[in-house]
Image (cartoon, grey):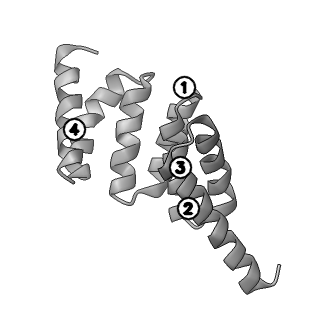
Amino acid sequence: MTEGTFEAYRRAESLLAANRPLDALRWLEPVLESNPDLPSVHLLAARCYLHSAQFTRAERSFRRVLELDPTDHFARFALGRTLQRQSRLSEAITQLRMAAAMNPKPDYLEAVNEVRARIMLREKDTGT
């Protein structure tokens, strides 16, 4: 990463932290173009997409992170949350369980329990 792209990356991080994901994405675009194989860049883009409710793009970016680094438990957790937001609960729980197995953080375990409960409620409501 060049100095200019590094500065753009840091600016995008700051904008996301300030809850300005669309502005962050504008700063991040050239960084993504010049660093297509850096998981950290795709992870930041995915977080921006998620925070701006662009779930399809977020999913695609989180999956790209996992292609580049299958051990990234946060990307797996965030992918699970993204799938959950799309009501794709069976896919979500798979990702969330893997994240919790990789790193049993309380947030991850709570997410697994939350999605499991929602799946059970859905099954109860539909009689399946």
Q: Which mark is residue 93?
A: none
Label 3 belongs to which residue?
A: 108
Q: What residue appears at the point 35 percent right and 38 percent down from the top-left corner?
A: 44
| 1 vs 4, front mark | 1
Label 4 belongs to which residue?
A: 12
What separation in Å lies between label 4 and label 3 (alpha carbons)?
26 Å
Could you tell me the amino acid type at mark 1? Answer: Asp
Could you tell me the amino acid type at mark 3? Answer: Tyr
Label 2 belongs to which residue?
A: 84
Which secondary structure, mark 4? Answer: helix
Q: Which residue reaches farthest top?
A: 2
Which secondary structure, mark 3? Answer: helix
Mark 1 or 2, nearer chain start: 1
Mark 2 or 4, nearer chain start: 4
What separation in Å lies between label 3 and label 1 (alpha carbons)?
19 Å
Q: Nearer the viewer, residue 74 or 91?
A: 74
Question: From this viewpoint, is residue 88 visible?
Answer: no
